[in-house]
């Protein structure tokens, strides 16, 4: 994972650049994010996407703005952080990672502000360091998810010549600080020499599979095949798929999971074909405060994403459009949820996370 082209985020104190994922795979272009406004814009327009990356870019955009224009009063800092995080959470509401980061940062800051002899400069520095630590922890967590997931799949799957994994959307280095969640499992299997093949769906309407996942797989010389979303059932029937592994934008207390639209149908198809279905996600994507998936807010996106391709209209003018960005897979269709703290069945998730903090 030394490849520079596969860094979704480049950061050093005071400077943040994001790889504009709307331009991939044609060109790898890094664009500066100079503050919260540009951070929220990069998230909303999907220049940066993937639940972990959204939280990291959002938090680092705050750090960059605090570095270039630090507040003079503690009260100003507290207000600025609170308002900024609200704005970043609102940019794409379905992914829980940004909301969790906001809640943690506000709680951390309130705690720090109570310490005796605290200065506004000291508080500002501690917020910047807090944001920077997210970047490092994400890569560590992803490597753990990859290894735990690979081991679990190998223990439960008999495939003498190596496993065939089907995945959806993009869950690799481009969706995280590095390594990836579901694609991290693929990477770990590949490193162990136990991966036979990866099948990735194109993931309409935004084509994160064909543009981004395929780009990562080709770059890292991992054997892979691209299919359209509508070929999934046929592929499961014909291509000896060992397991389906997807990411998540939010996993709730009972294990229901919101992920890129199209995930739910893969889970239904996997059940029919007797193929295990895994969700790979850091604990920061788990929201045990919501009891079921019915409570998850599903983001709806502009109709042009369906009617146009690269700015060219392909759909009949006047047709109505429904474009939810995510769907919710019910927990009974999920074999297990792979986190950095362990692999849990949906029923074990809530207790498993609380017992392995």
Image (cartoon, rainbow, N blue to C red):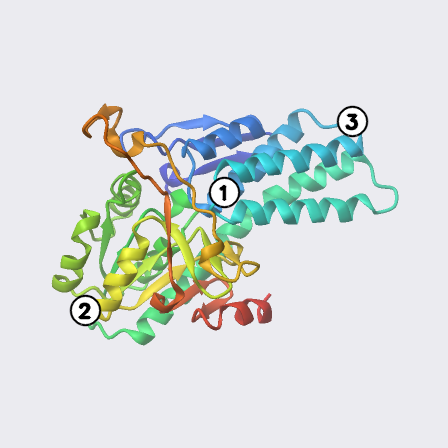
Name the residue beneath numbered marker 3.
72
The tag earlier along the polypeptide, 3 or 1, is 3
SS label for mark 1: loop
Viewer-nearest residue: 105 or 122: 105
Q: Tag 2's secondary structure? A: loop
Structural crowding at the residue carrying mark 1, measured as other residues with C-alpha within 10 Å and reported as few (<14), some (14–19) or many (≥20): some
- Give the residue number, with chain letter if any, for mark 1: 93
**Helix, strand or loop for disc 3:** loop
Give the label, 3 or 2, closer to the camera. 3
Pinpoint residue 72: horizontal percent, then vertical percent. 78, 27
Residue at 48% x, 68% y is 342
Q: How far apart are marks 3 and 1 (CA)?
A: 31 Å
Residue that appears at 11% across and 62% down: 238
Residue at image location 16% in from the left, 65% down from the top: 240
Query: In the drawing, does residue 278 fall left or right of residue 340?
Result: left
Which residue in the rendered view is the most extreme toward the left? 238
Question: What residue did someone put label 2 on?
Answer: 161
Residue 250 shown left or right of residue 238 in the figure: right
The mark closer to the camera, 1 or 2, is 1
Residue at the image position 47 percent from the left and 46 percent from the top: 94
> Residue 172 at x, y = what percent?
37, 48
Q: First in sequence: mark 3 or mark 2?
A: 3
């Amino acid at each position: 994972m030394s490849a520079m082209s596969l860094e979704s985020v480049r950061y050093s104190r005071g400077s943040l650049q994001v790889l504009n994922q709307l331009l991939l795979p044609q060109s790898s272009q890094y664009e500066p994010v100079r503050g919260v406004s540009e951070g929220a814009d990069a998230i909303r327009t999907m220049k940066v996407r993937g639940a972990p990356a959204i939280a990291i870019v959002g938090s680092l955009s705050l750090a960059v703005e605090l570095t270039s224009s630090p507040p003079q009063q503690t009260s100003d800092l507290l207000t600025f952080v609170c308002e900024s995080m609200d704005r970043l959470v609102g940019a794409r509401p379905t992914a829980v990672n940004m909301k969790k980061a906001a809640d943690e940062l506000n709680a951390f800051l309130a705690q720090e502000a109570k310490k005796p002899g605290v200065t506004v400069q000291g508080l500002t520095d501690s917020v910047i360091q807090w944001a920077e630590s997210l970047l490092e922890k994400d890569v560590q967590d992803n490597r753990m998810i990859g290894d735990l997931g690979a081991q679990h799949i190998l223990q439960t799957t008999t495939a003498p010549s190596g496993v065939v994994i089907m995945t959806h959307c993009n869950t690799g280095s481009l969706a995280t600080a590095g390594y990836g969640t579901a694609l991290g499992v693929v990477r770990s299997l590949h490193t162990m020499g136990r991966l036979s093949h990866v099948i990735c769906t194109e993931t309409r309407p935004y084509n994160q599979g064909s543009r981004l996942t395929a780009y990562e797989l080709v770059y890292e010389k991992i054997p892979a095949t691209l299919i359209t979303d509508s070929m999934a059932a046929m592929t499961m029937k014909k291509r000896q798929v060992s397991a389906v592994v997807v990411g998540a934008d939010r996993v709730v207390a009972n294990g229901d999971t919101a992920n890129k639209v199209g995930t739910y149908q893969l889970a239904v198809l996997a059940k029919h074909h007797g193929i295990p279905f895994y969700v790979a996600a850091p604990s920061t994507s788990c929201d045990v405060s919501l009891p079921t998936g019915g409570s998850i807010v599903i983001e709806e996106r502009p109709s042009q994403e369906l009617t146009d391709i690269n700015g060219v209209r392909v759909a009949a003018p006047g047709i109505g459009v429904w474009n939810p960005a995510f769907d919710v897979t019910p927990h009974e269709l999920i074999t297990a949820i792979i986190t950095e703290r362990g692999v849990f069945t949906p029923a074990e998730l809530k207790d498993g996370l609380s017992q392995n903090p």
